[in-house]
Image (cartoon, rainbow, N blue to C red):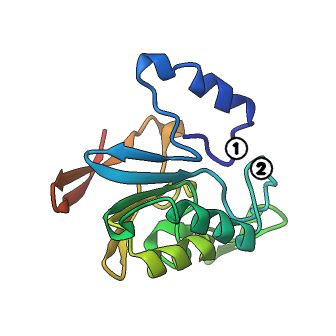
Amino acid sequence: MPGNDDDHLVDEIIKSYEDKGIIWPLDQVVEIAGFETISYEYVNPSPWDTPREKKEKDLKKDLEKLFSKVDHPEKTILNTHAPPYNTRLDFAPKLKNLKPVIVAGTVEMEHVGSKAVREVIEEYQPMIGLHGHIHESYAKDKIGKTPVVNPGSEYMEGILRGFIIEFSDKGVENYYKVEG
């Protein structure tokens, strides 16, 4: 799934591999492990003005439209690039003039996730939330009954991080961090 930094040209490249088993997840409900999955690539505005940013009210409207396509929101996998606001998943360096704010030798962190993503999770309580965007926040958390995860990213250091999620016919049985 494309992220906020990806130009829209990436979409056609990804779609060109559908005949090789690559799934284009956007603008539709996709079945994964017997569960409905909805995916959304846009994020709330950032200081970087990237190609896939929208205002929170527009994010909310788009996410509501996606949820209207699923039969059972509580058994849905929600895959959004933006993490939900005010969780362990959305800590990023506080910036001043596009540079990290440092206090007593430590980078000051703040919540930068999407309020719209948080609101739809609170409202629909999907089975699990899969998120990204904030590279510094390799974390898991919970909003109501919904576990939410962000594998973060340390690709510049050669570290790959992720989550293994175990499903049963009832839903998410377990989820845990992995890295290498």
Q: Residue at x 37, y 53 (%)?
A: 36
Quadrant location of the N terminus in the rendered image = top right
* Residue that protrudes farthest toward the top in the picture: 20
Between residues 168 and 150, which one lies in front from this camera angle? Answer: 168
Quadrant location of the C terminus in the rendered image = top left
Quadrant of the rendered structure where residue 103 is?
bottom right
Q: Residue at x 44, y 72 (%)?
A: 88
Q: CA distance from mark 1 to mark 2?
A: 5 Å
Residue 110, compared with residue 168, is above or below; it is: below
Quadrant of the rendered structure where residue 74 is?
bottom left
Q: Position of residue 164 (x, y in %)?
A: 25, 48
Q: Position of residue 46 (x, y in %)?
A: 75, 62
Q: Position of residue 54 (x, y in %)?
A: 75, 61
How many numbered discs? 2
Q: Residue at x 52, y 58 (%)?
A: 136
Task: Tell which circle, 1 or 2, labels the residue nearer the N-terminal end.
Answer: 1
Whether residue 20 is visible here, answered yes or no, is yes
Residue linked to disc 2: 50
Q: In terms of secondary structure, where does tag 1 sit?
A: loop
The answer to whether marks 1 and 2 mark residues whose Cβ atoms lie closer than 8 Å is yes
Between residues 110 and 77, which one lies in front from this camera angle? Answer: 77
Label at residue 5:
1
* Residue that protrudes farthest toward the right in the picture: 97
Q: Residue at x 16, y 62 (%)?
A: 170
Q: Residues within 10 Å of mark 2 (few under 14, many from 20)?
A: some
**Amino acid type at image mark 2:** Thr
Q: Is residue 32 left or right of residue 79?
A: left
Quadrant of the rendered structure where residue 82 is?
bottom right
Residue 150, compared with residue 20, is above or below; it is: below
